[in-house]
Amino acid sequence: MKAAFFDLEGWELPVITEVFKGKGIEIIRAENDLLNKNTLPQIKEAEVLSIAYSLADRAVIEALPNLKLISTRTTGFDNVDTVFAKEKGIGVINVPSYGEETVAEYAMALILNLSRRMSMTFLRSLFGVFDQKMVRGNDLEGKTLGVIGTGKIGRKLIKMASGFDMNIICYDVYPNQEVVDKYKAKYVSLEELFKASDVISIHSPYTKETHHLINFDTLKSLKKGVLLVNTARGPIVDTSAILQGVKDGIFGGVALDTFEGEQVWVKEESIIGNKAELPAGEVFKKGLESFYLLRFRNVILTPHNAFNSHEAVRRILDTSVSDIGAFCQKGNCEHRVV
């Protein structure tokens, strides 16, 4: 089978080549850049497409007539048109578990950063400003943490937060009894979570139901001074609502590792170098709104970095390559979503 890889870093290619050796898989393209319409004609023969940040939408799928498998080296697969892929009989695979502790640790770090105003402390210290009153924070002990989504990452965060003696409440359409029995967490409605939480951390997948789960209506329910952390998917949070909430003093702090329009900033080199198509106007607008949030001292934006540990990145590659190999040899693999 002929395979094309995009969104690589460079070090992965020798690993991929070694794993595929003797398995009848030919790598016809291996790019560090995003997949774009100019590249599509050059991979027309591809039977396997492996991506991370790139889109595999209807146009991409239609342009690759031999395509049999799309592998997204991520847990979320909203960058793939799974409905159209299914119609065309194309398999889609993801990496459902590679770093629940990696992302949960990062979320906990952001919570600590916001509660103790660490970013502002570091910034002021760089300029020799050591006024303690300006960077006074709050304890986490005794505060209420609201966790939206209690899958593997959410449960890891709950375990960590319990060590800080936080009160933990959760929302999930599929409650997990373990977090109740083991960590004394309590499942509540989403509205109750918004009203009671001192800290909210989002760990749910992005679906039609979770689109803009945090929105303008949500602002009316939130406790004044609440801290919000999102390490899940950007569109779960309405950037316009966050901007309004920050301006109105509803949020004591906001930390977004993933945010609407993030591709404008996270992949700016590809865009500036004209290697990728310009994002749609609405994406640019959301990107500008997100960037504007940085004007506020209690806002942190990071570049979709929660997953990014050496261990987790290697696990992602190993799982993806193993699944691609199994699919090419057996016609199926473990982590198939379509």
Image (cartoon, rainbow, N blue to C red):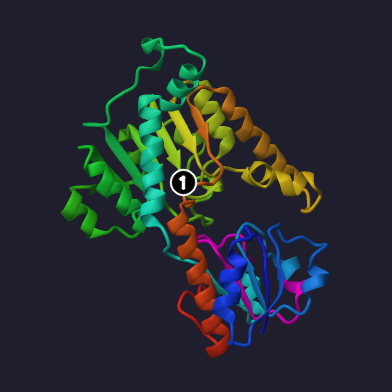
In the shown orientation, is residue 1 left or right of residue 313?
right
Whether residue 193 is visible here, answered yes or no, is: yes
In the shown orientation, is residue 171 left or right of residue 255?
left
Question: Residue at (72%, 71%) from the top-left corner?
Answer: 29
Does the stretch in magenta take in 74?
yes
Does the stretch in magenta take in 110?
no
Identify the image quadrant of the N terminus: bottom right
Question: Residue at (60%, 70%) from the top-left corner?
Answer: 14
Q: Is residue 48 above or below residue 116?
A: below
Looking at this view, is 233 or 303 the one in front? 303
Quarter location, residue 240: top right
**Residue type indicated by callout 1:** Thr
Q: Is residue 311 above or below residue 63?
A: above
Q: Position of residue 304 (x, y in %)?
A: 54, 46
Question: Residue at (51%, 55%) from the top-left corner?
Answer: 206
Q: Which residue is mark 1?
A: 231
Looking at this view, is 237 or 6 the one in front? 6
List the single residue furthest toward the bottom: 330
Quarter location, residue 12: bottom right
Q: Position of residue 18 (x, y in %)?
A: 57, 77
In the shown orientation, is residue 225 left or right of residue 164?
right
Q: 10 Å neighbourhood of mark 1: few (<14), some, or many (≥20)?
A: many
Q: How many marks?
A: 1
Looking at this view, is 323 or 236 the one in front? 323
Describe the element under mark 1 as helix, strand or loop. Answer: loop
**Residue range (magenta):** 61-81
Q: Position of residue 114 (x, y in %)?
A: 40, 29
Q: Main secondary structure of the magenta part?
A: loop
Whether residue 187 is visible here, answered yes or no, is: no
Q: Is residue 116 above or below residue 183?
A: above
